[in-house]
Amino acid sequence: MSFTLPQYHDPDFEQAQLKNAPDVVFQPAPMDGVAPEGYHATSIFPEYFKVNGTWLLAEESRMDCVAALRNGKIAAVEFRNLKAGEPVAVGRTEDGSQGIYVHATGFEEEKGEQETFSFRQGRSRETAYSMDYDSIYELLRHEKDHGRILWVMGPACAFDHDARDAFAALVRGGYVHGLLAGNALATHDLEAGYLRTALGQDIYTQRSMPNGHYNHIDTINAVRMCGSTAAFVDSGKVKDGIIYECVKHDVPFVLVGSVRDDGPLPEVYGNVYEGQDAMRNLVKEATTVICMASTLHTVATGNMTPSYRVVDGVVRPVYFYSVDVSEFAVNKLRDRGSLSVRTIVTNVQDFVVNVRKGVM
């Protein structure tokens, strides 16, 4: 099976509905961080705004932002980043009648006849995922050289010897262009490379080590003593692992903390909005996003990931996967508006090992 990016079909701006549509109306933001009445909220789909008779695509978007006119382009701006007086699009229709058109079908292929009633149309633990795995392997091979693959990871990925080794191999193989996580993933991965445990348990045998409950905070303390995770890796105290390979191969990672964090590691963002901005800087480059066993980071990433990306002037899809052993966790993302997500219900440790075998 060979992978081919689907072709994007632009809206037909010659159809009367869009050709005769008025220009979008812009109103000034009344104050910093506040949108005008009737503002238009962006979605995950390509959105066009008619400005001086020309339909402009918001080239970088995310849901639940406002559309501001900045330097002649449409920018999706978080409310907190709005500046007083800047022009914000107003209008809450999406059919072009107010100069705003949401194009949700740009990547759809022509569909043949479908039965009105059929079984197993949802995604659950009973779903057959064989084709999903094959599709992911082909996608990752393509994206390795032609895109940007961003991974979102929970600590479960570091608790298992084989999963940790498998993901480290994916980093070395060029299948990881960025990593989003919390303090726990990085801490327990570094603990495994430093002391061969995760939360005090041997990462292979799962045996609890004497005084093992100290190991993760001993690791954090050792990293803080070095001043940074990179310095800790360069010191030779950690021998392998996910973060080790990211440092060695200059793969950027963003760690955003929570109120329960121990330590934390020096790189962890304690200010959630600074962390969100750092996450979005990596999301803006991503063409494939794979989220594994971290509901909060997955939902956060989903909220800032559009269904498309403009690369060298060409509109292409952004592929988004959510992988978790919990059906609730993967369905929660779709319920929050990330309608283009592809969900897989499975153990993420097995998933990582399978992906490594499938692409390498």
Image (spheres, rainbow, N blue to C red):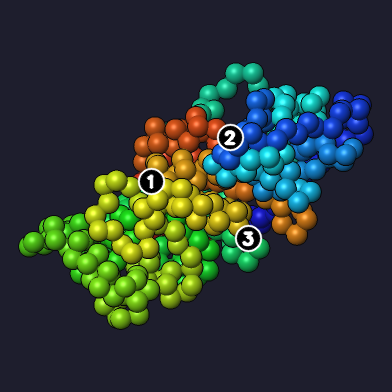
**Image check: 229 left or right of 120?**
left
Name the outermost residue toward the left. 210
Q: What element carries label 3?
A: loop
Q: Nearer the viewer, residue 302 or 263?
A: 263
Residue 202 % position (x, y):
18, 62
Can you tell which quarter of the image residue 65 is in? top right
Residue 233 % position (x, y):
34, 75
Q: Residue at x 54, y 41 (%)?
A: 80
**Image check: 58 left or right of 282?**
right
Name the outermost residue toward the top. 116
Residue 140 % position (x, y):
57, 58
Q: Nearer the viewer, mark 3 or mark 2?
A: 2
Q: Earlier in the sequence, mark 3 or mark 1?
A: 3
Q: Which residue is drawn at 14% across and 61% down?
A: 214
Query: Residue 34's mark?
Result: 2
Neighbourhood count class around disc 1 (C-alpha, 10 Å): few under 14, some 14–19, many 20 upward: many
Q: Which of 53 and 337 is in front in this view?
A: 53
Looking at the image, is 211 positioned above or below residue 297?
Answer: below
Which residue is identified by label 1? Answer: 294
Q: Is mark 1 on a helix, strand or loop?
A: loop
Q: Earlier in the sequence, mark 3 or mark 2?
A: 2
- Looking at the rendered structure, the kind of residue marked 1 is Ser
**Image check: 220 left or right of 273?**
left
Quadrant where the N terminus sits is bottom right
Question: Rounded to the nearest whole Å, what is the CA distance between mark 3 and mark 2?
Answer: 35 Å
Neighbourhood count class around disc 2 (C-alpha, 10 Å): few under 14, some 14–19, many 20 upward: some
Which residue is identified by label 3? Answer: 147
Query: Residue 181's mark?
Result: none
Is any part of residue 25 visible from this angle? yes
Q: Which of marks 2 and 1 is nearer the N terminus?
A: 2
Q: Which residue is drawn at 23% across and 71% down?
A: 222
Can you tell which quarter of the image residue 228 is in? bottom left
